[in-house]
């Protein structure tokens, strides 16, 4: 797996290319703003690896809670999805 550091501006201008390189070449992008790393674009694990991650819900559980939290706080938004 290869890691490449790019600016947020460059990533936004070439987003589709970054996603394709992450998907098909396994490239990880570190996105920088003013030279400071602020985000990371990483390839999704292959299906076999994904099954291993899903089996260990301790990795995905915190993310699921964070996604539900804003809806719980608002309480007024209808579920349209």
Image (cartoon, rainbow, N blue to C red):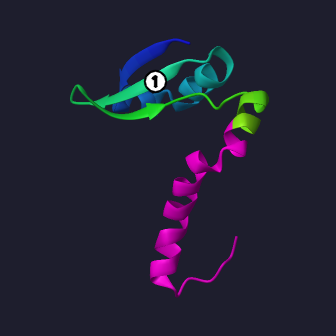
**Image height of 24 relative to 56, above or below:** above
Left or right, 63 with respect to 47, comes to left
* Relative depth, front residue between 78 and 12: 78
Question: How far across and down, in percent of the image, does residue 6 sit?
Answer: 37, 21
Total numbered circles: 1
Which quarter of the figure is the C terminus placed in?
Answer: bottom right
Residue 34, located in which quarter of the rendered image?
top left
Is 67 magenta? The answer is yes
Left or right, 48 with respect to 10, comes to right
* Relative depth, front residue between 60 and 30: 60
Residue located 72% across and 44% down the image? 55
Is 24 magenta? The answer is no
Question: Which residue does the numbered mark 1 point to in the structure image?
Answer: 29
Residue located 71% across and 44% down the image? 54
**Image height of 9 relative to 75, above or below:** above
* Relative depth, front residue between 11 and 73: 73
Question: How far across and down, in percent of the image, does residue 3 sit?
Answer: 46, 15
Residue 59, located in which quarter of the rendered image?
top right
Residue located 49% across and 27% down the image? 14
* Relative depth, front residue between 21 and 48: 48
Q: Residue furthest top?
A: 2
Q: Main secondary structure of the magenta part?
A: helix
Question: How far across and down, in percent of the image, does residue 11 sit?
Answer: 43, 29
- Residue interval drawn in magenta: 53-81
Badge 1: few (under 14), some or many (20 or more) residues near its Cα, within 10 Å?
A: many
Name the secondary structure under disc 1.
strand
**Image height of 81 relative to 39, above or below:** below
**Image height of 73 relative to 61, above or below:** below
Residue located 52% across and 31% down the image? 15
Question: How far across and down, in percent of the image, does residue 28 sit?
Answer: 50, 22
């Amino acid at each position: 797996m290869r890691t490449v550091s790019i600016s947020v501006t460059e990533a936004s201008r070439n987003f589709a290319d970054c996603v394709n390189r992450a998907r098909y070449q396994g490239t990880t992008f570190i996105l920088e703003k003013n030279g400071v790393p602020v985000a990371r674009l990483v390839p999704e694990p292959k299906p076999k690896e994904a099954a291993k991650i899903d089996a260990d819900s301790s990795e995905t559980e915190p993310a699921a809670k964070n996604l539900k939290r804003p809806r719980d706080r608002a309480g007024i938004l209808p579920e349209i999805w």
